[in-house]
Amino acid sequence: MGQTPNTFAGVQQTSEPSGAGHGSRDRSLDAVFEMLRSERRRNALYVLYRRPGPIQVSALADEVATREGVELPRVATALRHVHLPKLDDAGAVEFDHETGSVRLGDDSGRLREYLTAAAADEGLTLRRASASATLSEF
């Protein structure tokens, strides 16, 4: 009996034992859950999901800090040095560290499904970006 490959964002990966084959563009269910495990990463993804294009890290941090009710400098530092690089490595976002620009990566497949489920669990309605979407629409 063969195993059915999992697909995500156009990448095909066969089911493997835990810990095997985990690279920088891993699309396994474990990788998706790891991305969504952090509230700050989820909040950043919610903001990016509602944007039609790139946003500066400073503006993203401002929206995430407002949502979380915490200090902006702390959020900006954590996003720039921890969360955005992790999301970029996983292919969920495209983060240009030099320009400070970030945009949602390919939002197809499991990430979109589970991000939508996470938003619903947190009492949010997640709709894809339009030109005027803001965090206040949550």
Image (cartoon, helix red, strand yellow):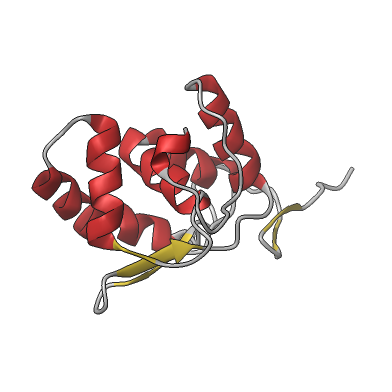
Residue at 60% of width from left, 42% of height from top? 127
Residue at 32% of width from left, 57% of height from top? 84
Q: Give the camera-side residue of 112 and 130.
A: 130
Q: Position of residue 85 (x, y in %)?
A: 32, 61
Q: Give the camera-side residue of 117 and 29.
A: 117
Q: Residue furthest front?
A: 132
Q: Position of residue 44 (x, y in %)?
A: 37, 47
Q: Position of residue 52 (x, y in %)?
A: 53, 61
4 to 33, vertically: above or below: below
17 to 54, vertically: above or below: above
Q: Give the camera-side residue of 11 and 15.
A: 11
Q: Is residue 46 left or right of residue 99?
A: right
The picture quadrant where one finds residue 14 is bottom right
Q: Give the camera-side residue of 115 and 69.
A: 69
Residue at 20% of width from left, 58% of height from top? 81
Q: Residue furthest bottom?
A: 98
Q: Position of residue 59 (x, y in %)?
A: 27, 56
Residue at 35% of width from left, 36% of height from top? 38
So how many labels did they put on this image? 0
125 to 77, vertically: above or below: above
Query: Which image quarter is the N terminus in?
Result: top right
